[in-house]
Image: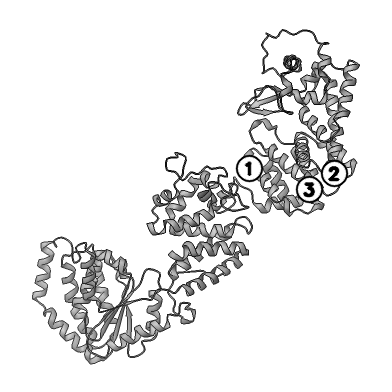
Amino acid sequence: MTHWTDEALSDEADDQLDRRRFANRVADLIKQAASNDESSVFGLVGPWGSGKSTLINFVEHRLRDPWKVVHFTPWAASSIEGLLAEFFAVIASALPAQGEARAKVLSYAKLVVPALGAIPLFGQAAKDTGDAVINRMDQQKPWSEQFQEASEQLKELRTPVLVVTDDIDRLEAGELATLLKAIRLLGRFPGVHYLLAYDQETLVDVLKGTGVAGSSDQRALAYLEKIVQYPLALPPARRIHLDRMLNLGLSEVLRDTGHRMEREAEYRFAQAHEDLLARTMITVRSIQRFLAQARSYLPLLEPGEVDVVDLLILTYFRMHFPTLYASLPSWRHELTSRHHSYQSSSSDSQAINWTERIQSTGVSPQLVMPVQTVLEELFPAVRLGSGSGGTRRVHHSDYFGRYFALGISDDDIADATVMRALEQAAAGVADSDLALFESTVSGVDPELGRLALRKAIGFLDNIDDSSIWPLVRYFTRLGATLPERHAALISVSDIAITLLASLLMRLSRVPDPGEINTLIVEQGGEVLTQAVRRALKSSSGRDKSDPVQAFALHFAKHARVRIIGNLAAKDQAGNDPIMTLVQIIALAGTTHSLTEEIVAGLGDGRWKIDDVAARFVSVGWIIGLPEKPELMGFDAPSLLAVLPTTRSYLSELPTQDGSEAIDKHDISWSNRRRFARRQLDEITFGAAEELPHGESSDSGQGIHE
């Protein structure tokens, strides 16, 4: 893998921007300037990251003997005097070590450096410092005389010198003013030329902090014109070259990290690049920084755990719009909501003005709409008000967090783990991934358990038909170990029910009756019961030979046995989901068999009508109060569907005092009989016959059984 270091190129074979022609022209201009005995200043102008340092290297390659090229680094100096000393030392280093020219330049510098260092650039120099300088100058030759002597020596050398000074826009205001004064007034020796590299906008801003510009852009530019005779603007990188660099770089990153970009993903990235990225990544440095970030962060997430295009675009946002990027997690609900209402009217207090939100993060006005366009692709809720929840996309609430955690955090589970767990469960292999999946589903964090099951549902399309029945057995067993459903509005068991129902709907063959019986008797609990009911409702209209229907017929037989066993146990009975079992029997088309057995029990005195009716009283839990179950309602239509002759048995019951209050928190069978009897009295007057099938004559905010 190639690592980016932001170093300037020295080998022209590595140049991807075709800068050779411009380097040739700059070198030719510098050579032409050396044809006379003057000193010239060239400016290489371009924004940060545009490749100025690389071009300097290419120009230097073209200045052969007799040229002497030296580099001056002013921003490395710790003081004004240090900057000036380094300035003259660099010029002297280009001259013969034992020659008179070097001696004259250094002698000149001994006078200039202390004197210029004492000239006040800000405020007033201390009086004693000024006196010391004046005394020293009184004992030496004048500047002009020493400058003339040094110049004569340089002329005799006939050796052109180029002093290269890169990144002068990094200097503080005082340092920059000193440097430009030194070049303008003190360093213009014949045959000594200067190549200054800078971003003009930044340089002007720095100059406005000095006395020469007076906070005026125009004065700063005018002053710069006095210093630089040949400003050479670096041609901007051509789009075709930058695109090629980005494409080649991304291909390498994806190959090295194992991530893939399918055709649809390629289109999405290309569209985002056209809408926004190409507007801001206009320099070599910006492209290379983006690729370096991609190389750094993509390996943190295994291939297939995220949508690689979403991750790349968020990487871009983190680099170019850090405040916006930092705001996204706080907007998670709106960005990932599937039911978030959006109104364009500003009068709607619930409306979200995304344009204003983006502006508030400091995005420049000309980029607000392009940024919003790309955000709309990342998060459909920005455009439509509701997300589609695409698999592994950042706008899916189950995946949003890992894009910002840049890994699988403690409140997440890797997709690869879930997929391998399904494979292991289907194969009957108890490996580490299956163990992790089980501990997650059954663990203390229900949200994480629900997440693991939701991921499993999403991967069912990748499971072959031969694995469906083994997975039905596995999730039936796992479901039987889960906590009761009344702890939350949507519990881990609820998601397990959805998963198991989906598997039942995928059955491609009728399992062996013995296996079905074993499954129901030994492992079947509420999760399987609810899953069968849901699968039957979803498959209504299918032929009785359909695997789901055939499975349901077996289950309906056991459901009938459970209902009769519950009735026979009377007040010692457990809390079987009678009404769900009744629905399964009805959906399987075998209600008549249940009716016959109930009527037989009424006839031989094994139970009474209020015992039967008590089984149709629902018990529920108010959300948040699982320790306080209560009687929630009475499913009269289901009772009448099973026992149409209910009224004929009411006369056998003793009269009940209708004024007596019923304690709904008492869920004993005796109290359920009283509650049911109260409702049965209403049936006598036809009040309950108007209810739709499956609804109770009472209601409550909670979970019913």
Q: Position of residue 544 (x, y in %)?
A: 86, 42
- Residue 445 appears in the rendering: no
Q: Residue at x 72, y 43 (%)?
A: 499
Specify the amino acid type for callout 2: Asp
Q: Position of residue 229 (x, y in %)?
A: 25, 79
Element at badge 3? loop
Callout in the foreground (3, 2): 2
Question: Residue 321, relative to residue 672: is it above or below?
Answer: below
User: On the image, which quarter does residue 254 sit in?
Assistant: bottom right
- Residue 704 appears in the rendering: yes
Q: Quadrant of the N terminus?
A: bottom right
The Cα atoms of the two marked residues, 2 and 1, are separated by 38 Å
Q: Quadrant of the C terminus?
A: top right
Check disc 1: other Cα within 10 Å, few if <14, some if 14-19, many if 20+.
many
Specify the amino acid type for callout 3: Arg
Q: Residue at x 67, y 48 (%)?
A: 455
Q: Which residue is mark 2?
A: 543
Check disc 3: other Cα within 10 Å, few if <14, some if 14-19, many if 20+.
many
Question: Residue 570, relative to residue 360: is it above or below?
Answer: above
- Mark sitting on residue 594: none
Q: Residue at x 40, y 84 (%)?
A: 61
Decide which of tag 1 and tag 3 comes sooner along the chain. Answer: 1
